[in-house]
């Protein structure tokens, strides 16, 4: 058994993708992206500004929830996270419906995917049910025709099995790494869309001891306030 | 819209009685003080054919109303219970086709309400082009920017709810209500024909005369009626007063998965007028 939780691996990997961004925003019900943002700030990007839409105490938005979208519209959000009930090989995402099943809805995706500087796609389930050749419903498109004004788009797709980068010129994903214990064949078998890959995909770097100390210390206490169930489950925190 | 005198009602039931069947109801998300006491009262009065507008999303309040058969249509960017998971009654009603759904995206709802605030017919919005949402919305239209060549842009129609409904920390004797930083509540109130608010505590005097409180005040000009409802957002939160009752939301998410479980929940927490609120530890004093 690995000396770290799956959630910790995913948060570290997302945290590295945040890179040197100045401002990251995290939307609804996203404990792992929120963990990634605080991890990035604690480890390498000390100046990172983090805006949690649903921060329970000290919420950064004083103009109501529209302020997040206004900030993005002004170009003040560098990185945002989106998920999908379905995600396809052209980075289109579906948050509405598929095969008779209803999902919560598109949230702000149809705007944020265009307006944020870059968007990291994150969905833990890695299966042909989720990663499909073509989504049943486009909540937000992965790319746009040149005449449509669009500041940003997908940067990468992280799942519970692998990390893909997005190649905007080819409009295709590329397998960057597979998580410890997962094989490239397993990723291919469980992915419904076509993607590029090097002959030998490296392993996703697991969290170091230093990373885990940060995650389980200052990061966990930030997260517990806003995602108590998650903190209880992953870090066994008594709240 | 008529100039209003703020009505001071006795309780949440009186506000529920002001909301007619078929009303188009503008509601805040779970993190922005839904008037849960009125939601319960609407279920008790067997309200029908409500149209709900989520500003910009909905959660427990909508799921309860949908499960209880009060709702004909939902316009929202999403309906979910957040960390507690899917909104179970919404999900089932949507999959069975029991309610009409007008899917949206958050800034389109904010923009539609802002258009009504300004008295203009539509608001332009970036993004969205290429989303399948556009085809579902005859009230959205992509046009060419008339001020620039080759620049398609989306217009969303103004949205005017019949009634804005939410909870607030304070009302005062002048009929103002204090919403603090939850300014989406002001947007809903500005854009709606009428606005009803429940509040935790009544303050003497006029909050607009207090320099520190005034920026968080929704002026009485927008308020049709208020009623006191202590812990009126429970099991949701009033920031600085009491937190979200996460255990209760988890209990609801589980109970609501079946019709029987949902009816049992209504029996225990809604039909009788003194719901059990003892599982919500307040995080700070009033």
Image: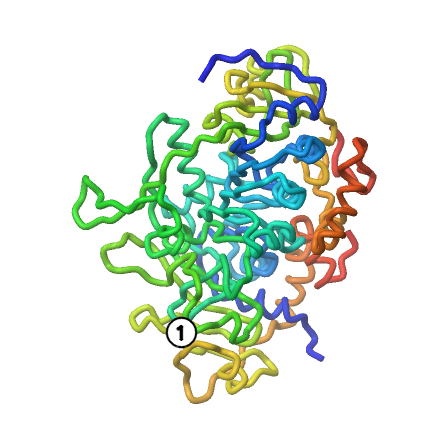
Residue at image point 54% right, 68% down:
A13
The quadrant in which the N terminus of chain B is found is top left
* Nearer to us in this view, A149 or A189: A189
Residue at image point 52% right, 61% down:
A44
Q: Is residue B282 above or below residue A45?
A: above
Query: Quick one: which residue is furthest to the bottom in this view?
Result: A199
Q: Chain of mark 1?
A: A
* x then y, percent, for residue A20: 44, 59
* x then y, percent, for residue B106: 46, 45
B121 on left or right of B39: left
* Nearer to us in this view, B164 or B84: B164
**Is any atom of residue B240 visible in this view?**
no
* x then y, percent, for residue A104: 55, 54
Label 1: few (<14), some (14–19) or many (≥20) C-alpha neighbours in 10 Å: many
The quadrant in which the C terminus of chain B is found is top right
For disc 1, the marked residue is A173
Residue at image point 58% right, 40% down:
B71
- Please, what secondary structure does the residue beneath circle 1 have? strand
User: Which colour assignment does the render follow?
Assistant: rainbow
Residue at image point 70% right, 42% down:
B244
């Amino acid at each position: 058994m690995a000396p770290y939780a799956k959630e910790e691996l995913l948060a570290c990997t997302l945290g590295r993708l945040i890179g040197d961004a100045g401002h990251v925003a995290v939307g609804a019900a996203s404990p792992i992206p929120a963990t990634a943002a605080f991890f990035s700030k604690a480890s390498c990007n000390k100046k990172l500004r983090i805006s949690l839409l649903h921060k329970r105490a000290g919420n950064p938005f004083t103009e109501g929830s529209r302020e997040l979208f206004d900030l993005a519209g002004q170009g003040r959000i560098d990185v945002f996270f989106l998920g999908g009930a379905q995600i396809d090989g052209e980075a289109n995402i579906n948050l509405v419906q598929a095969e008779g099943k209803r999902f919560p809805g598109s949230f702000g995706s149809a705007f944020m995917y265009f307006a944020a500087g870059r968007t990291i796609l994150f969905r833990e389930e890695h299966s042909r049910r989720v990663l499909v050749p073509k989504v049943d419903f486009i909540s937000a498109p992965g790319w746009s025709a040149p005449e449509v004004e669009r500041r940003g788009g997908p940067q990468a797709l992280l799942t519970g099995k692998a990390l893909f980068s997005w190649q905007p010129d080819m409009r295709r994903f590329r397998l960057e790494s597979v998580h410890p214990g997962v094989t490239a064949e397993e990723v291919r078998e469980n992915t419904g869309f076509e993607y590029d890959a090097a002959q030998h995909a490296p392993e996703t770097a697991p969290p170091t001891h230093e990373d885990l100390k940060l995650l389980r210390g200052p990061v966990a206490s930030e997260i517990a306030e806003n995602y108590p169930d998650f903190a209880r489950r992953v870090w066994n925190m008594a709240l | 819209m008529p100039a209003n005198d703020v009505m001071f009602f006795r309780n949440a039931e009186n506000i529920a009685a002001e909301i007619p069947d078929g009303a188009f109801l503008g509601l805040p998300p779970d993190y922005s003080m839904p008037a849960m006491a009125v939601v319960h009262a609407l279920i008790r009065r067997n309200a029908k054919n409500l149209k709900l507008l989520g500003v910009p999303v909905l959660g427990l309040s909508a799921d309860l109303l949908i499960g209880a058969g009060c709702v004909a249509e939902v316009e929202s960017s999403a309906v979910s219970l957040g960390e507690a998971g899917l909104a179970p009654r919404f999900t089932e009603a949507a999959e069975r086709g029991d309610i009409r759904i007008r899917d949206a995206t958050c800034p389109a709802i904010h923009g539609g309400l802002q258009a009504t605030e300004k008295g203009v017919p539509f608001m332009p919005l970036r993004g969205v082009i290429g989303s399948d949402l556009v085809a579902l919305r005859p009230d959205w239209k992509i046009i060419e920017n008339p001020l620039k060549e080759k620049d398609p842009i989306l217009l969303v129609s103004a949205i005017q709810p019949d009634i804005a409904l939410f909870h607030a920390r304070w009302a005062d004797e002048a009929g103002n209500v204090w919403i603090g930083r939850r300014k989406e509540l002001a947007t809903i109130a500005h854009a709606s024909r009428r606005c009803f608010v429940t509040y935790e505590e009544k303050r003497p005097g006029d909050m607009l005369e207090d320099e520190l409180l005034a920026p968080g005040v929704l002026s009485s000009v927008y308020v049709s009626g208020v009623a006191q409802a202590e812990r009126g957002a429970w099991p949701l939160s009033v920031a600085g007063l009491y937190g979200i009752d996460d255990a209760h939301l988890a209990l609801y998410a589980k109970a609501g998965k079946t019709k029987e479980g949902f009816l049992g929940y209504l029996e225990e927490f809604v039909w009788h007028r003194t719901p059990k609120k003892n599982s919500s530890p307040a995080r700070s004093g009033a």
